[in-house]
């Protein structure tokens, strides 16, 4: 309702300005003595009250236009001094004439209507949905590209752990500013070698079809797929390159470099979530072991099981650092400060550094427990070997005693 009120106020204000400020040719008709006006004082008073309200000013208590006559000036909302009416055209075409030019210092200013305003955006664009998935631990990018060569977009940087596939055609803008992803049927898919998939501008009913394209080349499928969502909005008239929002980001335009930058952060985030959950499972397992030790004073775990936990913890840490490249800056962000701004904002938005710090802390807890249990198992093995040595020594003593007794018996005979 507020937007409609502002639009109406702006339209009326512009119309009145064109009436009062337009330079018109003077009329030297002999009928200048006729000073009747087609705008009645009541109509002008109503319009003045409407414009005062639209400018968020309190309307005056008395009518602003009490009487219109020759050589009479009136005050328009206390903002500008407007001319006196000299005569009325004899044609009766509601055209007023001025007897002197208006000063530029007192010209009426139209109500400003900013297209950058969130409440007054006259060209709203549909948002671009971004969906990230993680359902496998490895993807064969080479075979994926070989079977989708027509959709493959060649890389623009040295990064080789992902590929970008394009589906559909972009629709050109009617104003000739190029192509826009907003509202088009074109979709992009960013596939990472470590198993993450990020879809741009793909509808809900089309997601399964895109995932099946990658599933044929994936290995290490997970029992449960991880999913995350985000939004990107294009606004060409944005005063800055990027504007942050709640679960979305606003850009002047979204191109392939922006897709690569946003996709890299979302792919790392969804994969990191999977590894964090893996480490959480190990932490829960060691917590149960510690509670059992608290009650019984001992624990029952095979060495093989412990070694499996050691390998799992080390492989998770290696995957996060090496495969995900969590601490490697995007090449596109290195080259262009605009994309560096997007990259840094999204890393902060998805808290990648804090989440890795939490993951590293949990892994240290797991490592401490593994070392402790390894020492216990090593002590158990040492105890076993000590007892085995004692038994062997005892057996040797018994054999020696038997030999001595047997030899003595023979000698006595």
Image (cartoon, helix red, strand yellow):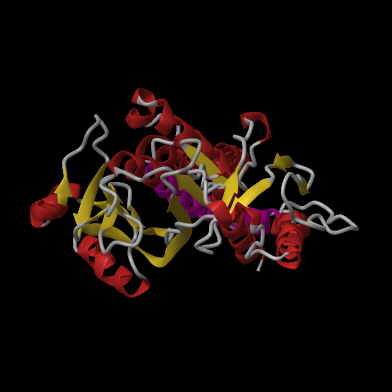
Q: Does the magenta-highlighted stretch encompass residue 178?
A: no
Q: Nearer the viewer, residue 116 or 381?
A: 116
Q: Which x, y percent locates residue 119?
A: 60, 56
Please give the name of the residue rendered at 61% of the width and 54% of the height, measured from the top-left corner. 13
The secondary structure making up most of the magenta span is helix
Q: Which x, y percent locates residue 263?
A: 37, 47
**In screen coordinates, is 32 left or right of 404?**
right
Q: Nearer the viewer, residue 7 or 282?
A: 7
Q: Which residue extends farthest bottom?
A: 205
**In screen coordinates, is 55 left or right of 22?**
right
Q: Nearer the viewer, residue 28 or 5?
A: 28
Q: Nearer the viewer, residue 36 or 4?
A: 36
Numbered disc total: 0
Q: Which residues are magenta?
A: 264-290
**Looking at the rendering, in which quadrant would you find the N terminus?**
bottom right
Instruction: Please indicate, yes or no, whether residue 373 appears anywhere in the rendered image.
Output: no
Residue 133 placement: quadrant = bottom left
Please give the name of the residue rendered at 41% of the width and 38% of the height, measured from the top-left corner. 318
**In screen coordinates, is 126 left or right of 56?**
left
Please give the name of the residue rendered at 62% of the width and 40% of the height, measured from the top-left corner. 99
Q: Is residue 339 above or below residue 319?
A: above
**In screen coordinates, is 358 left or right of 345?**
right
Instruction: Please indicate, yes or no, whether residue 177 appears anywhere in the rendered image.
Output: yes
Q: Which residue extends farthest right?
A: 61
Q: Which x, y percent locates residue 311?
A: 43, 45
Q: Does the magenta-highlighted stretch encompass residue 283?
A: yes
Residue 377 placement: quadrant = top right
Q: Which x, y percent locates residue 28?
A: 52, 46
Please give the name of the residue rendered at 20% of the width and 51% of the height, measured from the top-left corner. 140
């Amino acid at each position: 309702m507020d937007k409609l009120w502002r639009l109406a106020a702006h339209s009326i204000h512009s119309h009145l300005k064109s009436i009062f400020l337009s330079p018109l040719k003077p009329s030297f008709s002999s009928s200048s003595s006729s000073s009747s006006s087609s705008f009645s004082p009541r109509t002008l008073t109503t319009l003045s009250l409407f414009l005062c309200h639209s400018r968020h000013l309190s309307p005056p208590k008395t009518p602003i236009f009490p009487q219109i006559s020759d050589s009479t000036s009136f005050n328009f909302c206390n903002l500008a001094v407007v001319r006196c009416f000299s005569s009325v055209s004899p044609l009766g075409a509601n055209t007023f004439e001025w007897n002197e030019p208006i000063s530029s210092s007192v010209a009426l200013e139209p109500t400003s209507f900013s297209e950058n305003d969130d409440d007054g955006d006259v060209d709203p664009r549909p948002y671009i949905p971004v969906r990230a998935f993680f359902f496998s631990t490895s993807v064969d990018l080479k075979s994926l590209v070989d079977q989708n060569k027509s959709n493959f977009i060649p890389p623009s940087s040295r990064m080789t752990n992902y590929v970008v596939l394009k589906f559909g055609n972009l629709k050109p803008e009617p104003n000739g500013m190029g192509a826009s992803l907003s509202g088009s049927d074109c979709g992009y898919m960013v596939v990472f070698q470590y198993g993450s998939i990020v879809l741009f501008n793909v509808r809900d009913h089309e997601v399964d079809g895109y995932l099946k394209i990658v599933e044929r080349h994936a290995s290490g499928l997970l029992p449960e797929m991880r999913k995350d969502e985000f939004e990107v909005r294009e606004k060409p008239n944005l005063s800055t390159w990027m504007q942050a929002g709640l679960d979305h980001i606003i850009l002047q335009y979204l191109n392939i470099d922006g897709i690569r930058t946003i996709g890299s952060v979302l792919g790392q985030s969804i994969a990191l979530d999977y590894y964090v959950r893996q480490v959480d499972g190990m932490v829960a397992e060691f917590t149960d072991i510690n509670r059992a030790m608290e009650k019984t004073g001992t624990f029952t775990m095979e060495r093989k099981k412990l070694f499996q936990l050691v390998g799992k913890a080390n492989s998770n840490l290696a995957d996060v650092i090496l495969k995900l490249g969590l601490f490697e800056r995007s090449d596109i962000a290195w080259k262009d400060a605009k994309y560096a701004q997007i990259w840094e904002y999204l890393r902060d938005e998805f808290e990648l550094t804090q989440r890795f710090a939490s993951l590293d802390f949990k892994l240290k807890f797991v490592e401490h427990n593994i070392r402790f249990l390894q020492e216990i198992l090593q002590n158990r093995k040492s105890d076993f070997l000590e007892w085995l040595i004692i038994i062997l020594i005892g057996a040797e003593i018994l054999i020696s005693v038997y030999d001595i007794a047997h030899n003595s018996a023979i000698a006595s005979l």
